[in-house]
Image (spheres, rainbow, N blue to C red):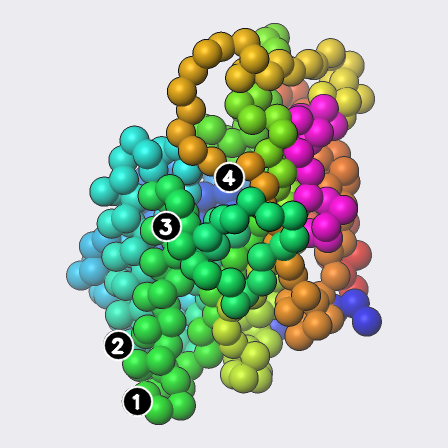
């Protein structure tokens, strides 16, 4: 049985999102706003220029508080004033290659940021349900061919992945110490480990789809660092909808809280070269312009930071617990993503495109 999405549950409810100006945070904010939720966001300045958050005009529809999750005092004051009922933590330094350049900031943001959010929740009685978004890269990668399960060892290799492993451990410690059955307060807490996410509105550096868009918009070939690496690709609406579903369901049934992989079916774990090829086909279909890519490793002799070659997720637990089924295949995800960027480069209203895609996605979930 397919999971039924009922976002009307959030109508009139207070939800605080850290990292709301980011790629996934912007999609989640728009989903919630269209359902009449009272949405509050806490984040630093816009992460990119342009940004989906700015292009869709979300600031005029929600309260956006500028702040750093490393700043406990400011974050605490926001919790005490807003008194949120639901909290989603997505604020992070999210780029692997950036974590090699700035490891200290990555650990400060991803580890102490999590500590600070949980500490604020501990001091705010209004919070009924909490979700911490981490990553599929939290697992110790053994380069094997099957998907990682939630009980696998947590030990990410690079500073980004490792900091997210630490975020998982911090969350578990707070859950056991302060929010479990033996603690002073019972509160459902889940960590969600999502696979690689694509979709319109991502303008970050060192991500495959934004890199594709920047290249083709400049009339250049797409330069792919590791075309043979395998990743679990999914459209951004898949994990965002799953996060909101978990947040609601664990509030209704606290025993469902824990940790969940959120990813596509195994058939949608693609090589980077394949997803780039599909991007090029879709780009021509939507714009009429040719696009092509080159293997950067073959063109230039460069030393690249370590990144896992093979990564899959076993999402059986999510599927069985919530009757969850992915709606869009990787091919459909690429098609929807290119549709969004094609309208962006043509100067169209991407807010309208975002709304159309949300409605199409939710029809699949009903």
Q: How far is mark 3 from mark 4, CA to CA?
A: 13 Å
Q: Is residue 269 magenta?
A: yes
The nearer-to-camera label among 3 and 2 is 3
Quick one: label 1 or label 3, which is nearer the N terminus?
Answer: 3
What residue is rendered at 79% in x and 56% in y? 364
Quick one: label 4 or label 2, which is nearer the N terminus?
Answer: 2
Q: How far is mark 4 from mark 1, CA to CA?
A: 41 Å
Element assignment for label 2: loop
What residue is rendered at 68% in x and 14% in y? 292
What residue is rendered at 68% in x and 66% in y? 316
Quick one: label 3 or label 4, which is nearer the N terminus?
Answer: 3
The nearer-to-camera label among 3 and 4 is 4
Quick one: label 2 or label 1, which is nearer the N terminus?
Answer: 2
Asked if residue 255 is positioned above or below residue 152 in the image, the reply reads below
Q: Are marks 1 and 3 in contact (CB under 8 Å)?
A: no
Percent x, y of residue 3: 74, 68
Residue tagged 1: 184
Please tell me how crowded label 2 is: few (under 14), some (14-19), or many (20+) other residues with Cα within 10 Å.
few
Percent x, y of residue 270: 69, 38
Percent x, y of residue 323: 73, 71
The nearer-to-camera label among 1 and 3 is 3
Q: Could you say which disc has been placed on residue 162 in the image?
A: 3
Write down the region rendered in magenta.
Answer: 264-279
Residue tagged 2: 123
Q: How far is mark 2 from mark 1, CA to CA?
A: 11 Å
Q: Could you say which disc has been placed on residue 149 in the image?
A: none
Q: Are marks 2 and 1 in contact (CB under 8 Å)?
A: no
């Amino acid at each position: 049985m397919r999971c039924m999405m009922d976002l009307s549950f959030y109508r009139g409810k207070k939800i605080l999102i850290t990292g709301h100006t980011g790629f996934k945070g912007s999609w989640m904010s728009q989903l919630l706003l269209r359902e009449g939720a009272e949405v509050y966001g806490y984040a630093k300045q816009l992460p990119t220029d342009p940004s989906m958050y700015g292009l869709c005009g979300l600031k005029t529809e929600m309260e956006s508080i500028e702040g750093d999750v490393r700043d406990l005092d400011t974050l605490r004051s926001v919790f005490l004033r807003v008194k949120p009922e639901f909290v989603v933590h997505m604020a992070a330094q999210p780029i692997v290659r950036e974590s090699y350049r700035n490891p200290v900031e990555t650990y400060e943001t991803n580890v102490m940021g999590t500590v600070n959010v949980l500490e604020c929740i501990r001091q705010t009685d209004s919070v009924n349900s909490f979700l911490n978004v981490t990553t599929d890269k939290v697992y110790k990668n053994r380069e094997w061919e099957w998907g990682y399960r939630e009980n696998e060892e947590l030990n990410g290799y690079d500073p980004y992945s490792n900091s997210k492993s630490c975020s998982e451990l911090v969350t578990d410690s707070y859950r056991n110490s302060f929010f479990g059955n033996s603690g002073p307060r019972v509160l459902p807490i889940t960590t969600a480990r999502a696979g690689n996410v694509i979709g319109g509105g991502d303008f970050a550096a060192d991500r495959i789809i934004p890199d594709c868009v920047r290249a083709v918009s400049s009339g250049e070939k797409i330069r792919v660092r590791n075309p043979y690496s395998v990743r679990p690709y999914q459209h951004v609406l898949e994990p965002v909808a799953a996060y909101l579903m978990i947040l609601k369901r664990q509030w209704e049934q606290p025993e469902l809280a824990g940790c969940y992989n959120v990813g596509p079916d195994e058939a949608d774990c693609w090589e980077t070269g394949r997803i780039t090829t599909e991007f090029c086909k879709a780009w021509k279909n939507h714009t009429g312009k040719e696009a092509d890519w080159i293997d950067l490793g073959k063109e230039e002799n460069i030393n690249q930071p370590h990144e896992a070659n093979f990564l899959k997720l076993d999402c059986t637990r999510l599927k069985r617990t919530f009757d969850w089924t992915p709606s869009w295949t990787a091919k459909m995800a690429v098609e929807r993503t290119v549709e969004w960027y094609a309208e962006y480069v043509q100067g169209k209203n991407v807010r309208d495109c975002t709304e159309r895609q949300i409605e199409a996605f939710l029809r699949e979930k009903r």
